[in-house]
Amino acid sequence: MGASVLTHPAVEELQLAKVMDALADPVRLAIARALAAEGEIACGTLDLGVAAATRSHHFRVLREAGVICQRPEGTTRINSLRRDDLEARFPGLLDKVLEAAAARAAA
Amino acid sequence: MGASVLTHPAVEELQLAKVMDALADPVRLAIARALAAEGEIACGTLDLGVAAATRSHHFRVLREAGVICQRPEGTTRINSLRRDDLEARFPGLLDKVLEAAAARAAA
């Protein structure tokens, strides 16, 4: 994985429809919630109950939409939420999505 | 169109991922914004710049996700946002999405 270039959209390139689509999936919502709670997480350490290839796909969708930042570290990738960028572009949105996801997970 | 049964999920059946997916599209965001601004709108009266079949598809996706209510009236359908239901289930979410969509549209 380390050789590929990890592209990230600039903050001014973030698109609402793409961000919404990235977060329109239970696994990706779970990733976003985990990152919100824990800050940085290596790709392999989250138990999402899906195959490694599926997990990589979900992380990539989140990165390409601008929801998360991925940086290579050794043989893995470290992921974090782009909270400030999302807040600058879509004020309040991420928090409401995370709150809704948390309420659903607790129900 | 009048003969088909228009199914709507109950408020307790609303799913975050489905609502997010329904709103993860520029045309459907435009429909939601128009309904938020105008209350009720007949299907044919919104100029969305897409074919009639595409328009019907987008309204159906919104209805099946629980974002809008559609009721038949003569040969058309009258659409409205399910604001209270969405607010009860995902507090604050719809407003933040609509604000973000409005900001994008104005940019």
Image: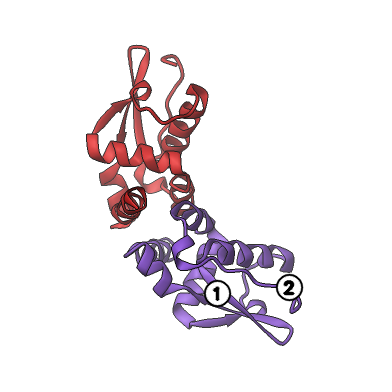
Chain colours: A purple, B red
Residue situated in front as seen by the camera: A10 or A20: A10
Quadrant (top left/top right/bottom left/bottom right) for the N terminus of chain A? bottom right
State the residue at coordinates (47%, 26%): B56
Say above or below: B58 vs A80.
Answer: above
Residue B52 left/right relative to A55: left
State the residue at coordinates (54%, 61%): A65
Q: Which mark is residue A4?
A: 2
Identify the residue under disc 1.
Answer: A69
Say above or below: A102 vs A73.
Answer: above
Residue situated in front as seen by the camera: B102 or A83: B102
Tag 1's secondary structure?
A: strand
Q: Position of residue A48 (x, y in %)?
A: 62, 69
Tag 2's secondary structure?
A: loop
Indicate which disc, 1 or 2, sits on the residue closer to the N terminus.
2
Say above or below: B38 vs A52.
Answer: above
Mark 1 or mark 2, whichever is nearer to me: 2
Chain at tag 1? A
Residue B51 left/right relative to A90: right
For mark 2, does the 10 Å Cα neighbourhood hold few (<14), some (14 to 19), or many (20 or more) residues? few
Chain at tag 2? A
Q: Position of residue A46 (x, y in %)?
A: 61, 76
Q: Is residue A58 visible?
A: yes
Q: Is residue B67 visible?
A: no
Q: Position of residue B2 (x, y in %)?
A: 41, 15
Quadrant (top left/top right/bottom left/bottom right) for the C terminus of chain A? bottom left
Q: Position of residue B64 (x, y in %)?
A: 45, 37
State the residue at coordinates (48%, 22%): B52
**C-alpha gap between disc 1 and disc 2:** 15 Å
Residue situated in front as seen by the camera: A96 or A106: A96
Q: Quadrant of residue B79?
A: top left
Tag 2: residue type?
Answer: Ser
Tag 1: residue type?
Answer: Cys
